[in-house]
């Protein structure tokens, strides 16, 4: 298979897994559960010395120097879209310089402006054992998230005004995938979603996509 993806769905590995599934690519999924120390083995560390998932290995016959190894989840998703998709205006791959720029800037924006606080909300509302949760940390993170979500809400309003229902285009692209893969952590937070109706509706549409639903079903 052309791609090997290391990680588990309940991690940032969702991003390359989702991108590959959207594109209908054949790939090998190596279940690498960081919670069990699987990302700290000598074999895995030879791929990513940081000891983190995901890792994507692209077995390209035309690559000088052998396989191409990619880590950092957003980079993995953007790479898959760029080099394994078709820039035909119908797939998740950006088809124009503007779409490519939007995919890059919103992916980086999500990592710098949203992910830390979204993860705090997830951990202290749902994921951690109840005895270890600190609701006050989740409350503070939710308040901070109002600032970047207002930026996204305004962008989606501008996109709708120009007849485009998604972040980078009139169709779902890797830009939507990358942002949605983080915001899904706070989708159950009504105090946030109710304040940003365009963002809430957009996120609901992203998570209803067959590729995402198929991943969830296979992981169940």
Image (spheres, helix red, strand yellow):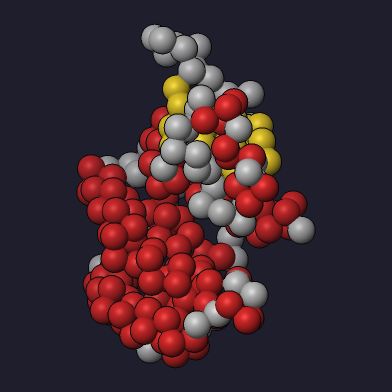
The answer to which image quadrant residue 219 occupies is bottom right
Residue at 63%, 81% in the rendered image: 130
Residue drawn 52% across and 43% down? 53
Q: Quadrant of the N terminus?
A: top right
Q: Quadrant of the C terminus?
A: bottom right
Residue furthest out toward the front = 131
The relative height of residue 167 versus residue 72 in the rendered view (above or below) is: below
Instruction: Choose between 49 and 207: the one closer to the eye.
Output: 49
In the displayed structure, does residue 134 sit left or right of residue 160?
A: right
Along the line of sight, the residue nearer the viewer: 183 or 35? 35
Residue 16 visible: no
Q: Position of residue 104 (x, y in %)?
A: 28, 48
Q: Residue at x 44, y 38 (%)?
A: 50
In the image: residue 146, left or right of residue 79: left
Residue ID at (40%, 60%): 179
Q: Is residue 205 above or below residue 107?
A: below
Q: Residue 25: horizontal and vertical position, in percent?
A: 59, 35
Choose top left, top right, bottom left or bottom right for residue 131: bottom right
Front-most of residues 184 and 33: 33
| Total residue callouts | 0
Q: Quadrant of residue 146?
A: bottom left
Instruction: Note whether residue 190 is visible.
Output: yes
- Which is nearer the eye, 220 or 8? 8
Where residue 5 appears, as percent x and y from the top left, is: 58, 36
């Amino acid at each position: 298979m052309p791609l090997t993806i290391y990680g588990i769905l309940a991690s940032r590995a969702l991003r390359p897994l989702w991108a590959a599934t959207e594109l209908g690519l054949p790939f090998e999924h190596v279940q690498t559960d960081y919670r069990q120390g699987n990302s700290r083995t000598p074999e895995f560390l030879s791929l990513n010395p940081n000891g983190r998932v995901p890792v994507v290995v692209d077995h390209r016959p035309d690559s000088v120097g052998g396989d191409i190894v990619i880590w950092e989840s957003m980079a993995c998703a953007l790479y898959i879209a760029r080099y394994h998709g078709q820039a035909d205006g119908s797939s998740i791959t950006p088809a124009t310089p503007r779409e490519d720029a939007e995919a890059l800037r919103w992916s980086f924006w999500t990592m710098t402006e949203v992910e830390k606080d979204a993860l705090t909300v997830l951990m202290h509302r749902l994921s951690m054992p109840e005895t270890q949760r600190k609701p006050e940390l989740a409350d503070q993170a939710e308040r901070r998230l109002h600032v970047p979500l207002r930026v996204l809400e305004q962008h989606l309003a501008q996109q709708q005004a120009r007849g485009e229902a998604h972040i980078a285009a009139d169709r779902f692209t890797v830009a939507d995938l990358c942002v949605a893969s983080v915001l899904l952590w706070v989708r159950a937070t009504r105090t946030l979603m109710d304040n940003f109706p365009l963002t809430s509706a957009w996120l609901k549409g992203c998570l209803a996509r067959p590729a995402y639903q198929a991943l969830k079903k296979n992981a169940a």
